[in-house]
């Protein structure tokens, strides 16, 4: 859903991968687990020249200067210099405080999306003035995207939230697990938005306000935007994870809701409400036998698993109430 993985990775020894040196700004490979396995893969994220040293970023490229200094000094006794993207610590502390307040408002249940958005707006305006160059601020924009979506503004959620988060995420590394998840989310939300407009009956258009009617007739533009993000998401998945010919590792198998919606097998949703996510997936018939699909809802929801038997029957494992949509992650 455009954020860090909700499950911790396995612990083990990968001797070959351990031979690569670290570079926070000059990494030319992305390290990831092959979906569905504990196999580590290192895939080129830039064009490599013969004889060029492979360099791996030991940390998340969105780490703040304080985070990577603490980690590298503790683990490797190596100091980390600031770079051109690093924001002042006070700005990052303010971003953290604003996000914490937003999460508390959401948790209390007394504030709707408009109230949360009103609270976020002053800090958002500050960032828009040119202070948002630090990739560490991508989490704020991911939150902003979700709040805008909850407020019934999917196009703005994509443009002002997740698309800006993607720009920040790619500032240091052009392709990563973060960019793969963000582009998939942009594709899914854009496609849902385009489908929602398609579902408006023609007889109802005359009764809509002018701005709503114009939105209802902008379907080609929305479809073009959705197709753009779909192609971008495919590219980011291919470069970061590969798996084009490996069962359970392909972009399609790891994003069943996106493909089902694209091919008209999944009912669209309006705003932040949608049919039950588990039912959406079960209805598509798109889950491959043996594939375990993880679903996520809002910012930090409990994970819901839909287990698939060898006969292709899905079974809900845990409560899925309150899910915003079917966001597929890798296991």
Image: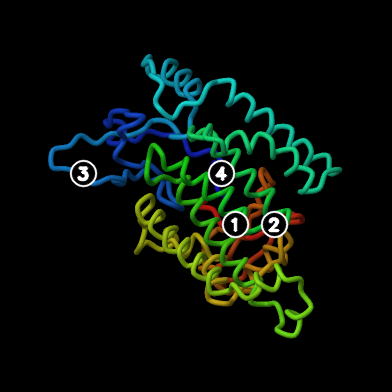
User: What percent of the width, then of the height, locates residue 52?
Assistant: 17, 37
Residue extending farthest right = 110
Task: Estimate how packed mark 1 is, as few (under 14), some (14 to 19) or many (20 or more) residues with alpha carbons within 10 Å.
Answer: many
Label annotation for residue 126: none
The residues bearing labels 2 and 1 have C-alpha atoms spaced at a distance of: 9 Å
Task: Estimate how packed mark 3 is, as few (under 14), some (14 to 19) or many (20 or more) residues with alpha carbons within 10 Å.
Answer: few
Q: Earlier in the sequence, mark 1 or mark 3?
A: 3
Which secondary structure, mark 1? strand
Residues tagged 2 and 1 counted as in contact (Cβ below 8 A): yes
Label annotation for residue 324: 2
Q: Nearer the viewer, residue 224 or 9?
A: 224
The residues bearing labels 4 and 2 have C-alpha atoms spaced at a distance of: 15 Å
Label annotation for residue 48: 3
Residue extending farthest left = 50
Specify whether 158 is left or right of 42: right
Which secondary structure, mark 4? loop
Q: Which of marks 2 and 3 is nearer the N terminus?
A: 3
Q: Is residue 240 above or below residue 309?
A: above
Label annotation for residue 3: 4
Q: Place residue 72 in its image quadrant.
A: top left
Q: Which of 35 and 116 is in front in this view?
A: 116
The residues bearing labels 1 and 3 have C-alpha atoms spaced at a distance of: 33 Å
Task: Estimate how packed mark 2 is, as few (under 14), some (14 to 19) or many (20 or more) residues with alpha carbons within 10 Å.
Answer: many
Q: Please report the residue visible at 50 percent of the width from the left and 23 percent of the height from the top.
A: 67
Q: Please report the residue visible at 58 percent of the width from the left and 26 percent of the height from the top.
A: 92
Residue extending farthest bottom = 203
């Amino acid at each position: 859903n455009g954020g860090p993985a909700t499950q911790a990775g396995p612990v083990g020894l990968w001797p070959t991968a351990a031979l690569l040196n670290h570079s926070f700004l000059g990494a030319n490979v992305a390290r990831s687990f092959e979906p569905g396995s504990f196999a580590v893969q290192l895939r080129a994220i830039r064009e490599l020249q013969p004889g060029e040293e492979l360099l791996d970023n030991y940390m998340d490229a969105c780490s703040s200067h304080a985070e990577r200094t603490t980690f590298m000094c503790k683990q490797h006794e190596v100091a980390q210099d600031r770079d051109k993207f690093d924001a002042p610590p006070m700005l990052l502390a303010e971003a953290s405080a604003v996000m914490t307040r937003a999460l508390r408002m959401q948790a209390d249940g007394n504030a709707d999306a408009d109230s949360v958005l009103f609270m976020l707006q002053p800090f958002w305006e500050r960032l828009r003035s040119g202070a948002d160059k630090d990739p560490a601020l991508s989490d704020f924009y991911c939150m902003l995207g979700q709040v805008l979506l909850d407020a019934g503004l999917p196009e703005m959620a994509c443009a002002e939230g997740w698309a800006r988060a993607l720009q920040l995420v790619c500032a240091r590394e052009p392709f990563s697990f973060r960019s793969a998840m963000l582009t998939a989310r942009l594709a899914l939300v854009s496609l849902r938005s385009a489908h929602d407009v398609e579902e408006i009956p023609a007889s109802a258009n005359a009764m809509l306000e002018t701005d709503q009617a114009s939105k209802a007739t902008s379907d080609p533009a929305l479809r073009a935007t959705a197709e753009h993000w779909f192609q971008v998401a495919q590219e980011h998945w291919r470069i970061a994870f590969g798996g084009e010919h490996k069962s359970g590792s392909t972009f399609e198998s790891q994003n069943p809701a996106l493909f089902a919606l694209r091919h008209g097998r999944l009912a669209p949703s309006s705003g932040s409400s949608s049919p039950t996510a588990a039912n959406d997936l079960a209805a598509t018939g798109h889950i491959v036998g043996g594939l375990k699909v993880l679903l996520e809802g809002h910012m930090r929801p409990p994970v819901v698993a839909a287990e698939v038997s060898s006969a292709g029957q899905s079974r809900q494992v845990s409560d899925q109430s309150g899910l915003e949509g079917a966001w597929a992650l890798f296991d």
